[in-house]
Amino acid sequence: MMRTTAARCSVEDSGRMKSKTDYRSREKSGVAPGLDPSARRLPKEPRVLIIGGGFGGLALAKAAAKLPVRVTLVDRRNYHLFQPLLYQVATATLAPGDIAVPFREIFRGDRNVRFIQSEAMELDPERRVVHLRSGREPYDLLVVATGSEDNDLRSSSWAAHSLPLKTVEDSIAIRARVLAALETAEQQYADHNARGALTTFVIVGGGPTGVELAGALADLTQSTLRKNYRSIDAREAKIMLIQADDRLLPQYRPALSYDAERRLRSLGVDVRISTRVVDIGRGYVLLDSQGKRERVLTATVMRAIGVRPSGLADLLRRRLNALSDASGRILVTPRLALLRSSDTSTHQGPEDVFVIGDLAALDDGSGSPLPGQAPVAIQQGKYLAKYISARLQGKNIEPFRYRDAGQLAVIGRGAAVAQLPHVSLRGLPAWLIWAVVHLGQLIGFDNKLLVLGRWFWNYLTHQRQNMLITGELGSSSRLFGYHLPELEIARSEDKTRPVELGTRKKVIP
Ligand SMILES: Cc1cc2nc3c(=O)[nH]c(=O)nc-3n(C[C@H](O)[C@H](O)[C@H](O)COP(=O)(O)OP(=O)(O)OC[C@H]3O[C@@H](n4cnc5c(N)ncnc54)[C@H](O)[C@@H]3O)c2cc1C
């Protein structure tokens, strides 16, 4: 249904744009010529307020910096995060600073871009004002690019006993938990069960994030940590990848999925296909494979299973009657303007509020909504800058079209699968493309060099420079009859301070 709507909208638009009479009547009414009637003429140097400095918001802000507009970028963090490499922080190849760059550094030379570290809380569309946690921010054009959040709502037990991978803090928490589990296993010589659970790492979700994390963890335990312990052999660590679907990477061509599975198995990963996780609790996961239940003892469960739209989706629904799809993403017009429920007869948004990236749901004619991926967000950000430029000049602009350059996923060291528009690649050639693409997208020349250096060093030596267990060791928690030292990672900051593990105590029942 959405596709029909989008298509109809663009056809109607182009017909309307060519009408001379319409053009003149809109000039009289103060509507920018060549644009939708709801597109107000913009003031001189309009205020463009962007909420969210992820891939979409940043691409827009950088491109809009070259236009005669005043840009304000609001983000609750003071840095842009390159999420696709979070798994490499979680597995100690990269440091957080390699993949996160402060906005103030990024916009140092852009005099018309202002950054505010704050959080959008409320919206007053009548007055065109966004209420931030720290104050009010007026706008002429508002762009919401707040992406998605970890989806930990299946059950509170899942949230409490498994680790997501969405933020820098998450990646540091995973790194600390994996390394601390191995440290603890090194001391658990008396108890076979506890040691088994401590050296079992379960990843839930066989999409690109799960596959990449499993490959990198396998490489960490098989190679990097091989000689580091005395009473355990890190190579015996068990990495399980649980996939509910009947193949890994379901959005890839089947041959690439099977290749990814084969490579992961050759790295020693226990890949479970058509297997659902039905429960996660303290020290275990419960699996269901076509009715057959299995309880796996594990101290570390990582979730790589989907996200939900950012909380601002609710605000847009409440304040602007925004429409959303079944997953809660906000429906947008082909020009990325927010679609209101009162607009359904014409399918036009008000053209002063736009939504891009993971938060937006747009079917550009391919049959299904565009995926929540970085290139979609980047292309939409760049498109909006062109739209604003065209609108300032009173020109028309074609609807947004996504150019799909393919998708890539890494499997361990020096291997990947690449699904390009007309060809599939695997192994080292795919990894080289992956490396070039990711280095190209990283922000900052320093970061590109640093990351390239770390990859090269890791490739040659298997060594990793970031194997710190950071955070505080809090109260011990009971697991399999032992007190397992439990890390309480400060969720708001990386203290980057190695801590000593607490002492092992036998629980007296
Ligand atoms: C682990 C992981 C791996 C991934 N790997 C890949 C990959 O390999 N390839 C790929 O194409 N995609 C990948 N993705 C998906 C990709 O990162 C997203 O599609 C992309 O980040 C979406 O961009 P965005 O601009 O919509 O939102 P985001 O990049 O998520 O940015 C949203 C920004 O909004 C800010 N924000 C949120 N709420 C508020 C608020 N209320 N007020 C102020 N600021 C707010 C956040 O701090 C954040 O900076 C991965 C995602 C994850 C989590």
Image: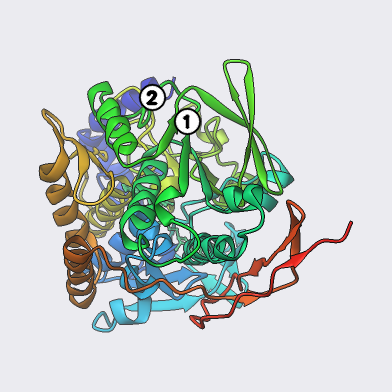
Q: Is residue 90 above or below residue 355?
A: below
* Kind of residue at badge 1: Gln
Question: In what element is the residue under mark 1?
Answer: loop
Q: Of 368 and 432, which appears nearest the observer?
A: 432
Could you tell me residue 496's position as x and y percent?
A: 48, 80
Cβ of mark 1 under 8 Å from ligand 1: the answer is: no
Q: Within 10 Å of the Cα at label 2, are there few (<14), some (14-19), or many (20+) other Cα atoms?
A: many
Which residue is identified by label 2? 247
Could you tell me residue 388's position as x and y percent?
A: 28, 57
Dot 1 and dot 2 residues touching (CB under 8 Å): yes
Question: In what element is the residue under mark 2?
Answer: loop
Q: Is residue 154 left or right of residue 53?
A: right
At 50% from the left and 76% from the top, the residue drawn is: 117
Which residue is identified by label 1? 243
Q: Which mark is residue 467?
A: none
At 54% from the left and 64% from the top, the residue drawn is: 186
The quadrant of the image that shows the N terminus is top left
At 74% from the left and 59% from the top, the residue drawn is: 482
Could you tell me residue 114's position as x and y percent?
A: 38, 78
* Kind of residue at badge 2: Arg
